[in-house]
Image (tube, helix red, strand yellow):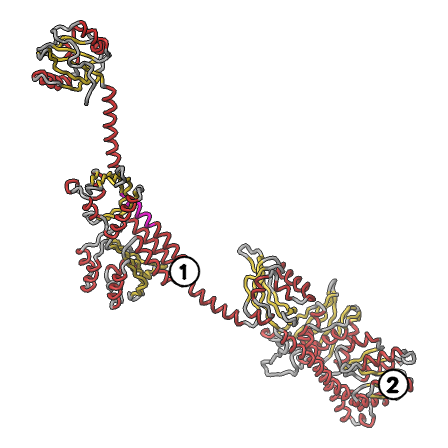
Amino acid sequence: MATILVIDDDPTIVEAMRAALEIQHYTVIGTVDADMAPQLAHTYHPHLILLDYLLSGSNGTTVIEGLKKDPLTAKIPLILLSAHPKAREEAKRMGATAFIPKPFDLSLLYTMIRKYT
Amino acid sequence: MEMPLFVPTHSLDLDAPSVPSSFAILADSIPVMIWKTDQQGKRIFFNEAWLSFTGRSLQEECGDGWISDIHPDDVEQYLFTYRLALQHQQPFHAEYRLHHHSGAYRWVFVTGKPQYHSNQYTGYVGSTIDITDRKQTEERLESYKQRLEIAQYAGGIGTLEWNLNTNQIWCSEEQLHLFGLHPQLFSGKFEQIEQIILPSDHRLFIETINRDCATHKDCDIEYRILHKDTTLRWIKTQGKFFYTRRGEPLRFIGISYDITKQKQTEQMLRFKAESNRILSHSFRYKKTLRELAKTTVTSIADWCSIDMIHDDGSTDYVALAHADKHKVAIVNRFRKVRHHLFEQDSETAKDLRQGKTLFFPLVTEQFLQHHVADHSRLRFLQRLNLTSLLIVPIQIKGHTIGTISLATTDTHQRFDEQSVEITQQFASSVALAIENATLYEELSAQKERLQNVVANVSGVVWEGEGELGKEHTTFVSPFAKRMVGFELDEWYAHEGFWLRLVHPEDTTRVVGYIHSLFTKRTHGIFSYRWITKKGKIIWIQSYVSALRNEEGERIGIRFVNVDITGRMEIERRKDDFISMASHELKTPLTSIKVFNEVLLQLPELTKNKQTRTYLLHMDRQIDHLTTLVRELLDVTKIQAGKLQLNKSDFSLHNLAKETIDVLQTTTQHHHMRLVDHAHIHIYADRDRIGQVLTNLISNAIKYSPESEIIQISIEKDEKYVHISVKDKGIGIAPEHIDKIFDRFYRVFDATDQTFPGLGIGLYISLGIIKRHKGTIDVRSTYGKGSTFRVTLPL
């Protein structure tokens, strides 16, 4: 099954996502440290990245920019998840593959993952 | 009158009874008519001049023949004179009419003198000359003189001659008439004239005469005299002083005429002009009335009293004037104890109440006794020594509010019809002034109130006239200084000052907006930024309206600008807070939701039916909570006008179907039916339209607990697509139907059924549809169900 990199500053969310994905037999690499994202991507070659867009810091933007610039990670589908109302436009602007507003139904998340892996 | 005699007594030889030929030759050669008598007085000679005058022969004239030439009317008189002279051998002269050969009689002057020869009386020699021309001139002169007298009499012109040495004065009959002096009682002394001059004018009169006399000026003087019958006349005397060669004044010759009428008219006009001036100048009417009273006593009356009379008859003595302050004090003392100007229920008071003018040209003792019952009042009035009295009511709308009382005393002037008319006009003006003043007082009070309000408004109230952006300030409220820092003078000094304050980025928008307001002839509120003197940017909310003239043309602009920087900041913080709060709420919701759905995937849990049901309940409640959080955020966005649309082309059918599928899972009672004929696509925000559909269908479910069918129909016409959600539920009572789209509005049902919710669903739906330039309407029958219809442009 596919490997999914989950980046969210809220450890509970990382935990929940891990539970939700693992039960669907995905391999989950989770982190609360956005700065670790490129390194983890390099190490594990995930099939998809689920990234929380953090507006409180500039991490989200920086992470996406870094991943997009890096030829090794540029092509990995990236789904942005956020509770922030402005995140949808940002996602589009930054070139994210898809956007899922928080909170969401797992069925929607599963559909999206299936679509891009 | 001495006439030249061409016949010197002793130079001619007249000794013979017959006329010697030398005399005849001489007499014939001169143009004067000459005749001669004998000792008996018989005419014995007429010269050629005589004979050619009468056209008769010497024979016809000699003897008594010449008598028939005399005018029949003059014969008797002339012959009497002639014979009397002859009898006493005295010289004589006479004028009579002599028959001329032309047939007419002509006036002749005759002189006759007795002639002596060696002391022996020899007879008369006479000369006769034609004086017709002189006579006519004299007659003409006489008639001129008469005419002048007539003219002077008719014109009321008197003449006088005053000997300055003897102080004797000669007055023409008309002059005496002007002075009101009887010709037989006039002493011819200047002192008698001095006595009739009104005492108050006497000094000026004497001073003027002395001055003009000393400076060799023509004299022109106006003064008042008092006739025996106590009437007052204004006299004007103009004349000249004559002096000796050494410059000592000799006499004064002058003419006089009566200028009373003219003077009165002048006084009236002056009074009218002055009173109008006073009335139009002040709005403090009591002060005005006191001024008016003073004017009155210097022009048309000696006393003036203006008083306000209350309904109970009590009097407010507003103004009282007399040239003499002491007299005013006396009256005021009397009035202090009398609170009524007129005796209660007297005819006088009644008449005045009815608006009648009371006019007494001559106030006599009998008059006072007849009219004044109160004893002390009568005594008081007697002391005032009134000549003439005039009381005019001041009326406003037919109601007497006061009186103007005029009286003359010392000047003895009598009021006449003209005075009445003037005073009535005066009273109307006063009434108007009082009415205006009352209105003005109210207006001033209001204005003051308004000014206080404007001054205390924590905003800039500003008015300016002129072209947009180039207005000159006509008013700016003092708060402007506090709000933007510039002195008020600067507002007045520069055209379009307000526009200078506008933030450069907002200028175009501001001007455009105001233009559009003026074009639509409306007013509006909008916000923009100003830069203060210190360079600080402030947000202002501006209420703008046009100033228009009576023709409705725009002449300027009015702003009421309020500093909303603080409010904007609070608003921004509120927005930030709500987005933050909703974000913060959504994060735990996300993990709860995920965990819950993971639990639902665990077979060891879901095999227990009860556990599974609970987990499903939790899932729905989490969804509901999520919806509430999102709606709160949406309300904030809609309110701030910040709802953003993410438009795309999509199938309404699919959206409706998806929504129905989701919602169908939430209810077992209802059956949702989608009615649409074609796959209609629209370009809109899919999520938001879905949100509206969800809201409408959820409401339909919620408010039709007893009913099954909920019908969703999608139709389109040329321009619009219509989405209807119809239920057969409880319906909406008419009193609520207009309010259900209001924010936080919730219907509390009469049957006490309450329905959960924040009351923001429809508000948000309407906000979303409006952003799509669409509409939502509702038709409902209470107790039978409702149909909500969304209309969106294609």
Where does label 1 land, which residue? B282
A73, above or below B541, in the image: below
Q: Is residue B746 left or right of residue B252?
A: right
Which amino acid type is shown beneath numbered disc 2?
Ile
- Residue B740 within the segment the image draws in magenta: no
Residue in front for this viewpoint, B598 or B76 = B76
Residue B744 visible, this angle = yes
Q: In what element is the residue under mark 1?
A: loop
Horizontal side, residue B249 vs residue B570: left or right = left
Would you say B682 lies left or right of B207 here? right
Residue A70, picture quadrant:
bottom right
Q: Which residues are magenta?
A: B258-268
Residue B257 location, x and y as percent?
Answer: 27, 41
Disc 1 crowd, CA 10 A, few/some/many (<14, 14-19, 20+): some
Q: Find disc 2 in the rendering and name its residue.
A: A4
Q: Amino acid at mark 1?
A: Ser
Residue B71's x, y, as percent? Answer: 17, 16
Query: Chain letter of disc 1?
Result: B
Q: Quadrant of residue B381?
A: bottom left
Residue A24, quarter of the rendered image = bottom right
